[in-house]
């Protein structure tokens, strides 16, 4: 079993030391929390952005488990908030979305922004064709695209921060 863990590092990809002081919140959105999960119980990918601006990443693909964590700046967290606000995902309802069957891949998105807390759960969809065939194609399409944006942005931050080769 191979396990790679790197928690709370203060060195960037070029070996430059960064301050361990966390950025303060510069907007009036209050507490912000975001979690994205995709997978099954044993094979999954998860991103979590905590109110303390810590981005956590876990990738479990047996036999390996990879964990990464870094602290983000206020500007970067504001970009996550912008993605959430502009997507319209906070106004959705997942009642008509396909629910994952036991053992199937699922997609979850949980967000707390201002005084609103949402938690969506759906069968993991791999294409817009699957989205358009659902009973709520508009809402599921917004959810699908929001997940792609969050996953892409968080993934690029993790890859950039922990890249071992200088650019």
Image: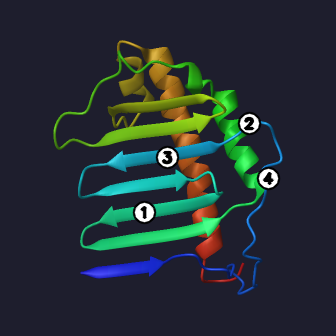
Q: In the rendering, at what x and y percent does residue 123 appear?
A: 31, 33
Q: Secondary structure at mark 1?
A: strand
Identify the image quadrant of residue 17.
bottom right
Q: Secondary structure at mark 2?
A: loop
Nearer-N-terminus badge (4/3) = 3
**Mark 4 vs mark 3, CA separation in Å:** 19 Å
Nearer-N-terminus badge (4/2) = 2
Residue 89 drawn above or below residue 148:
above
Q: In the rendering, at what x and y percent does residue 145 appear?
A: 54, 33
- The mark found on residue 75 in the picture is 4
Q: Badge 3 is on which residue?
A: 35
Seen at 42% across and 31% down, the residue is: 120
Identify the image quadrant of the C terminus.
Answer: bottom right
Seen at 40% across and 80% down, the residue is: 4
Identify the image quadrant of the N terminus.
Answer: bottom left
Q: In the rendering, at what x and y percent does residue 106 appear?
A: 31, 40
Q: Bin the neighbour count of mark 3 within 10 Å (Cα to Cα): few under 14, some 14-19, many 20 and up.
A: many
Q: Bin the neighbour count of mark 1 within 10 Å (Cα to Cα): few under 14, some 14-19, many 20 and up.
A: some
Nearer-N-terminus badge (3/2) = 2
**Mark 4 vs mark 2, CA separation in Å:** 13 Å
Do tag 4 and tag 3 residues touch (Cβ < 8 Å)? no
**Mark 1 vs mark 2, CA separation in Å:** 27 Å
**Mark 3 vs mark 2, CA separation in Å:** 17 Å
Q: Badge 1 is on which residue?
A: 58
Marks 4, 2: nearer the viewer? 2
Do tag 1 and tag 2 residues touch (Cβ < 8 Å)? no
38 sits left or right of 142 in the view: left
Nearer-N-terminus badge (3/1) = 3
Observer-nearest residue: 106 or 113?
113
Q: How is the image coloured?
A: rainbow
Q: Badge 2 is on which residue?
A: 29
């Amino acid at each position: 079993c191979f396990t790679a863990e790197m928690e709370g590092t203060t060195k960037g990809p070029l070996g430059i030391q960064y301050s361990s002081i966390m950025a303060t919140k510069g907007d009036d959105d209050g507490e912000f929390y975001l979690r994205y999960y995709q997978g099954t119980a044993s094979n999954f990918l998860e991103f979590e952005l905590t109110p303390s601006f810590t981005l956590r990443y876990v990738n479990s693909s047996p036999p390996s488990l990879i964990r990464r964590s870094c602290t983000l700046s206020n500007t970067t967290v504001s970009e996550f908030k912008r993605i959430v606000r502009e997507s319209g995902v906070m106004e959705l309802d997942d009642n008509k979305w396909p629910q994952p069957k036991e053992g199937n891949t699922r997609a979850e998105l949980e967000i707390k922004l201002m005084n609103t807390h949402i938690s969506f759960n759906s069968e993991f969809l791999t294409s817009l064709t699957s989205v358009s065939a659902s009973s709520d194609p508009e809402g599921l399409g917004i959810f699908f695209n929001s997940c792609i944006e969050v996953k892409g942005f968080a993934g690029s931050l993790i890859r950039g921060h922990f890249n071992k080769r200088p650019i």
